[in-house]
Image (tube, coloured by chain):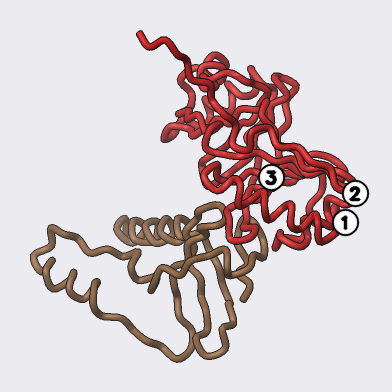
């Protein structure tokens, strides 16, 4: 046996920085599990989600929100959903499987993404420089979710609360993504 | 150019990738007697219309859906956008409907 142990780093080593009117924080206490219903198995999945998380399968662009583990469910593609919930361990699918059993195909996506929260009164001002979507609350209200590009990087943007946005992007380009956000913060503060 | 996605609403064309003529959906039957000829036509022959054209677009930086977009090649006007899956299912339903008659 080796006499050392490995400790996993987060994509941005717990980055956190405040600018005037806006805070940028890496989120490390949430897991992401991809959920896909087996062919002709959607009804069973809907039942299991209702029973365990008390949520419906969401339409594209809207979060389903559950009190169970503060989970949110959103549509990432046709017939594919992401469940994001409070969890810091290494086996997120076991948690979801304990609720949904075999009603869905599950894939742990937690380590594939960097999650960055942009919050504060100037958050929309920061994001409007890099996000091609209209994120004014009238067009993109709280609980809205969309996948788009920011600085050429694929990004999922979630409107978590007033002046509070969560951004998901590929872990492999996490620092490039952060640079885009920080640059926009500097330009707008 | 803006593509009005059937599920997600208007999105900038930069989120999409052009994938070719929508006729690519209709892949020939590889067991047909004249399969070689059909595949030759499928692979190499394209219409090049000056005007309305049906084409495949992939929403790579979005929901990864495949779309059939009807676009005017002279004006870039987009007159119709539908999910490729819906377009295929509609065609299959039409075919099976004809088969029953």
Q: Quadrant of the N terminus of chain A?
A: top left
Say yes or no: labels 3 and 1 on the same chain.
Answer: yes
Q: Position of residue B24 (x, y in %)?
A: 33, 68
Task: Tell me the chain of label 3.
Answer: A
Instruction: Say which colour chain A has.
Output: red
Q: Nearer the viewer, residue B5 or A23?
A: A23
Mark 1 is surrounded, within 10 Å at the Cα level, by few (under 14), some (14 to 19) or many (20 or more) other residues, namely few
Q: Secondary structure at mark 3?
A: strand
| Residue that extends furthest to the front in the rendered view of this protein | A3
Instruction: Say which colour chain B has.
Output: brown
Q: Residue at x 88, y 44 (%)?
A: A120
Q: Quadrant of the C terminus of chain A?
A: bottom right
Image quadrant of residue B23? Answer: bottom left
Say whether marks 1 and 2 touch (CB < 8 Å). yes
Residue annotated with mark 2: A20
Task: Tell me the chain of label 1.
Answer: A
Locate residue A116 relative to residue A139 in the image: left or right: left
Residue annotated with mark 3: A167
Please state which of the two labelled residues, at mark 3 or mark 2, is closer to the viewer. 2
Q: Which mark is residue A189?
A: 1
């Amino acid at each position: 046996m080796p006499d050392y142990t490995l400790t996993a780093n987060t994509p941005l080593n717990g980055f956190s920085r405040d600018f005037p009117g806006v805070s940028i924080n890496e989120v490390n206490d949430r897991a992401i599990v991809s959920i896909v219903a087996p062919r002709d198995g959607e009804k069973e999945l809907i039942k299991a989600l209702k029973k365990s998380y008390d949520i419906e399968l969401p339409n594209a662009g809207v979060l389903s929100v559950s009190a169970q583990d503060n989970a949110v469910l959103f549509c990432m593609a046709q017939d594919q959903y992401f469940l994001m919930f409070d969890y810091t361990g290494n086996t997120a699918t076991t948690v979801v499987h304990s609720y949904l059993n075999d009603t869905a195909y599950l894939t742990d996506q937690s380590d594939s993404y960097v999650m960055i929260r942009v919050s504060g009164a100037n958050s929309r001002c920061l994001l409007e420089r890099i996000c091609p979507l209209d994120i004014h609350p009238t067009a993109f209200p709280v609980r809205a979710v969309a996948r788009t590009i920011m600085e050429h990087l694929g990004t999922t943007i979630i409107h978590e609360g007033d002046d509070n946005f969560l951004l998901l992007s590929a872990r492999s380009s996490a620092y490039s993504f952060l640079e885009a956000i920080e640059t926009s913060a500097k330009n707008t503060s | 150019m803006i593509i009005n996605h059937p599920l997600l609403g208007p999105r900038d064309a930069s989120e999409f990738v052009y994938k070719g003529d929508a006729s690519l959906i209709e892949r020939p039957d590889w067991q047909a007697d004249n399969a070689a000829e059909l595949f030759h036509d499928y692979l190499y022959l394209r219409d090049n219309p000056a005007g309305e054209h049906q084409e495949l677009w992939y929403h790579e930086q979005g929901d990864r859906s495949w779309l059939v977009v009807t676009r005017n090649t002279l004006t870039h006007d987009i007159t119709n956008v539908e999910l490729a899956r819906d377009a295929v299912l509609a065609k299959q339903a039409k075919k099976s409907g004809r088969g029953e008659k």
